[in-house]
Amino acid sequence: MNTPSLPGKYPYSRPRRNRKSGWSRRLVRENELTVNDLIWPVFVQEGQAQSTEIGSMPGVSRLSIDLLLPEIEKAAALGIPAVALFPQTPQNLKTEDGQEAFNPDNLICRTVRAIKDTVPDIGVICDVALDPYTSHGQDGILVDGYVANDLTLETLQQQALVQAEAGCDILAPSDMMDGRVAAIREVLEEEQFVNVQIMAYAAKYASAFYGPFRDAVGSSANIKSGGKHSYQMDPGNTDEALREVMMDIEEGADMLIVKPGMPYLDIIQRVTSETSFPTFAYQVSGEYAMLHAAAQNGWLDLDQVMMESLLAFKRAGASGILTYFAPTVAQLLADR
Ligand code: PBG
């Protein structure tokens, strides 16, 4: 890709020629964001006609099922392919072992059934992890203060099963236990849910960018000590992300997630160039909050940085993005 140096006073090769007008820039554009790239994460809570604004996530509210359904209908009408559901479990249902996770009538299962009844054509993704259900806010079961891997796997299998029975299309294990994809795949195959997909949070980092999410699902106050560093990945690692990804693929994952998004674009790029698997970036709550905060101060143009940040994921090779901006972006794309 060397530009030959030609004799003469002026450059013969001028990359700016292709940039001279809008039509030409469109013609040579390498990556484009479309509505088909978007997965919308939503927060759900108990009750009727309940809407709670999330202070650290401007424009995002946690909704009761009745208020969520019309929003999902709008998202489907805009062409958003899938939503990812996150529940706020009432404090009195949170326990040491997180057993509400596998109650077939828990909030998330009721939400899935309601969506499948009213908006059958949108894909429904459920998180598989115990943190919304544990009194300590960790993603698994604690034994002497340590998240016990294999004990947690048994609970994740039960959680996966009730979600699949409720009609969930894609299970997204976000817990980072070793062997969880195989454990979940096994129970799905045994129980005839052969077509339920697994979107594995293959490379999920122990990140400080999840703060606002923990406010939204009400788990921040519960995480008292230790953080999640004994199971989520160390932000210094790249090769390890590849090993995690390869394990999840071997264990039966259909799609992969890299999380967070923007601070880990290198990981997305490497995962997509070294595997042929559909890989999604999760633009997490802290990234969303950051762009909004700057925009509120008048320091950044929200629409422009929103679009640019999402396009960056496409450029890095992502098949799509989980983003709280999804409905706003879908509307913006539709209006163009
Ligand atoms: C929980 C889970 C988290 C997120 C998605 N699933 C938080 C965490 O691991 O503590 C974060 C998403 C976000 O910040 O937007 N297993």
Image: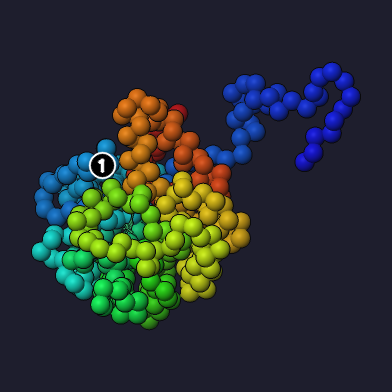
- Answer yes or no: is residue 158 visible: no
Towards the viewer: 235 or 307:
235
Q: Position of residue 83 (x, y in %)?
A: 34, 52
Q: Position of residue 214 (x, y in %)?
A: 26, 53
The residue under label 1 is which amino acid type? Ser
- Answer yes or no: is residue 233 visible: yes
The answer to whether residue 122 is left or right of residue 14 is: left
Q: Residue at x 43, y 62 (%)?
A: 233
How many residues crowd mark 1 within 10 Å: few (<14), some (14–19), many (20+)? some
The answer to whether residue 16 is left or right of residue 202 is: right
The answer to whether residue 195 is left or right of residue 52 is: right
How many dots with numbers?
1
Beta carbon at label 1 within 8 Å of ligand 1 = no
Q: Residue at x 17, y 44 (%)?
A: 52
In the image, ligand 1 is in what quadrant? bottom left
Q: Secondary structure at mark 1?
A: loop
Towards the viewer: 254 or 177:
177
Q: Position of residue 120 (x, y in %)?
A: 32, 55
Quadrant assignment for the N terminus: top right
Towards the viewer: 217 or 233:
233
Q: Residue at x 32, y 40 (%)?
A: 289
Q: Position of residue 56 (x, y in %)?
A: 26, 42
- Quarter of the view holding residue 114: bottom left
Q: Residue furthest top?
A: 9
Quadrant assignment for the C terminus: top left
- Quarter of the view holding residue 148: bottom left
Q: Residue at x 13, y 59 (%)?
A: 90
User: Which residue in the protein does label 1 denote?
Assistant: 56
